[in-house]
Each structure stands twice: as C-alpha cells, then as structure tokens.
Image: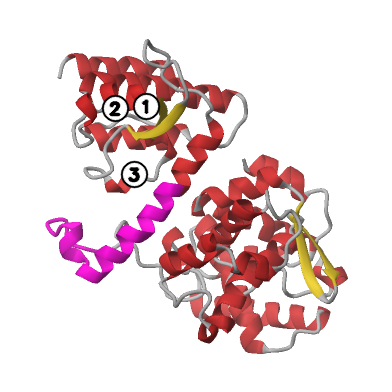
Amino acid sequence: MREQINKFLAQFDFDVRKSKDARFVDQKCTPDIVCFVADCVLNMVSTKPLFVINDIWKTQYFIQNSRVVFNKPWADDKKAYNEYNKVLSQPLKLLAYAKVLNVSKVNASLTFSVNNEELLDYISRKDRNTYNFLYCYFTKVLKDSGFLKNLEEYKAEQVKGLNEARENLYEKYFRFITGNTPTHSRLDIRRMFHKILNIYAVENNVPGSKGKFVMTFSETMYNKKNWRDINKEKSVTRQEALSAEDVEKQEVINAYYVQKAIALIKKTHKESEVNDYWSAGEATQVHHIFTRSEFPEIAHYVENLILLTATQHNTKAHPSNRTQQINKDYQLTCLLAKSDSIEKSLNKGEFVYRKESFIYVINKGLSVEFSNKIDFTTIKSELTKIYNTA
C-alpha cells in the first residue's frame, strides 16, 4: 500500500518553506488517534459530506468510543473541551494538509469533506495502516522541505553519541520551523517533532524522542499500555499481569476494534464467503473462525472473521446454535473459504487483508508454525492435513 500512498502524495508539494505552516503535524497526531478520527469521519460522512469539527463531536459514535478508546471523560463533558478539541482538530488538520480531506473556511469555521475516500478508509482500519500512512506522509513533507537529510544524519550520528545527536536534531528542527513559519514556541515545536521522530525511529530501528533503546511501534501510540505489549514473566498469565481494572478497560477497547473489523467484513463482502448447500439467502452473520473467548488476541483480525448466512452460522459453524461450540469440520471449511477470499482480494489489489496476518491467525488458532513465505495453495493443503489427522 505504501506505493499507492506515495503515488498519491507525489501529486502535491508539501514544502513547509512555501506553506509557512508548522501544523502539518501536532501533539495529538499519534497513529491510534489519527486512526480513530478517520474512523469517526467515515462513520458520519455518508449523511454529512460537508462537516465541521463539532459535527463529529456530537455523534454518538464519537461520544461513546472516545471514552472507550482513550479512557477520558465523556466527550460532551464541558470540562473535557480543550482535550477533545485537540483530539479532533489536530488529526483533521493533518489529514487536510495531506490532501486526504479537503478543507475551507465557511463562516469562520473550518469545513471539511473527503478528498480520497479509499486512503481515508485504509487509514481508519487499524493503527498499523495509519502508521504506514504517517511514515509516507512525514517523509514526503520533510523531503519537500529539504529537512529529511537531518533525520538521516541523526540515524548515522546517534550510534556515536545519542543524546548529542538527538539534541542537535531537535535544535535544527526548531531553527527550521522558527525560520519558516510563525510558530516560535520551543515547547510546542519540540512536542510536534516528537511525533515525526518517533515514526521515523520505528521505521529505521533507532531511538526516538526519549530513552536509549530502539523505538517500538507500541510506543508511538497515545494509549501505550496494552496487554499484548506488557513486559511480564512468561509464567504469568495476561490476567495476572494486569489489574482487574486494566483487564476491564482492555476488554472494552478490544470490543471497539472487533466491531470495527466486523463492520469492515460486512462492507467488503455482500454474499456468504462459504459457497455450500446452506449459503442461499442473505449473509448477515460475521463469524469468528477461532472463537473470541478462547483467542481474544486475534478476535479483531479481519482474517479471523468470515461472512456467513444465518443458517450456516447457527447450524453448521455452531451446532444447534450453541455459540460456545465449534464444528471442527466446518471450521476447516471456513478457513479454506477465507483463504480463497483473501487471495482473491489481494489479487485485485485491495488492502483489506494481509497474507501474513492470516498465517498469524492460523498459527495462533492451531498452535502451528506456518512460514509467511508459503503460498495459498500450500496453506490450504497444510490445513487439510492438520484437520484430517486431528
């Protein structure tokens, strides 16, 4: 997808020396926040193609999910105005600067519309997609602005002396911004540059805005704490490593991501993905191939979700509609059908699925170690062998 993102961005000149605008990035422009705001826009834009910030703010989708995702007060709480104003306005301005959204002033209010729905949809699907977009976007802005060479110098110099190399980089960025834009607050400029440096650091395996170790993907997030990334002893279970409150919060957050994945499956597929005797009729059920209760860590993967008819779901996938039971034979049927769906989607150049993610789902669900290098024919052959010998 990066090739397509770069092709889109190549149409525009993002030179800060010409735009005189330092706010092509801002403090709240982390992958998870930008992803969430893009998701909110897509959930509203069909009924409100032209919108202002307050239009998103007032939607139940934003009010409910912002509290879930960011663990903040309700979005309609007046005391939280300043915080939510940044959470919404800064990512929207970034997306507008990147030409993913259009923006103009109407009656003194910034009014937005969608310019590239396909790219906005890609950004909205998951944090990793947003990270890919931000890396391409930041690289293009800095290259157009003649500043990218300073990051490349930092990559080379940080090996010799990290703190000095990092401070030199921040000083160069401060001088660059103050020399070309009206923004002169050292603190603001530093906070904005954190977001750029951290994305660059993950991509190039170097330390980011703080610390002496290589920056990790999870550290670029606003919500950094996640049970997938907690440093715990292998003998300690996830439930033991987290407090009861943390577990509850994480389950609510996971539920949001599962619902996003389910919505994407329904948007992508209009008929049952399994073509069998029971596939006639409307496909309304999104089924977890590996159950959500047993495998929560892959519950939000679209590669673990398959669209079925009600009959397929309630009589075949779950015998006698017992949702806690799985028909193993039909589980294989679903995996083979999902493999076909993913292969067809990738061959069409769509960006809904990743083969690597499908293999990850299989490896988790079946406790196997398929290589990412195997093709779809081999995947189906190996799956059939596993289930036939079980």
Mark 3 or mark 1, which has the lower sequence index? 3
Residue 378 pos. (x, y %): 37, 17
Instruction: Report the amino acid beneath label 1.
Output: Ala
Question: Can residue 43 be seen in the rendering of this structure?
Answer: yes
Image vertical order of residue 295 relative to residue 156, above or below: above
Residue 215: x and y, percent? 45, 64
Q: Position of residue 159 (x, y in %)?
A: 49, 68
Look at mark 3 in the image and give the residue it sits on. 299
Specify few, some or many for label 2: CA neighbours under 10 Å numbering under 14, 14-19, or 20 or more: some
- Magenta stretch prevailing secondary structure: helix
Alpha carbon distance from label 3 to label 2: 19 Å
The answer to if 241 sits in the magenta stretch is yes
- In the image, taking residue 313 as reference, residue 141 lies left or right, namely right
Q: Is residue 153 visible?
A: no
Q: Which residue is mark 1?
A: 310
**Quadrant, the C terminus:** top left
Query: Magenta residues?
Result: 231-259
The residue under the point 21% across, 63% down is 232
- Label 2 sits on residue: 314
User: Which quarter of the figure has residue 287?
Assistant: top left
Between the residue at mark 2 and the residue at mark 1, the CA separation in whole angstroms equals 6 Å
- Measure the C-alpha gap from mark 3 to mark 1: 20 Å
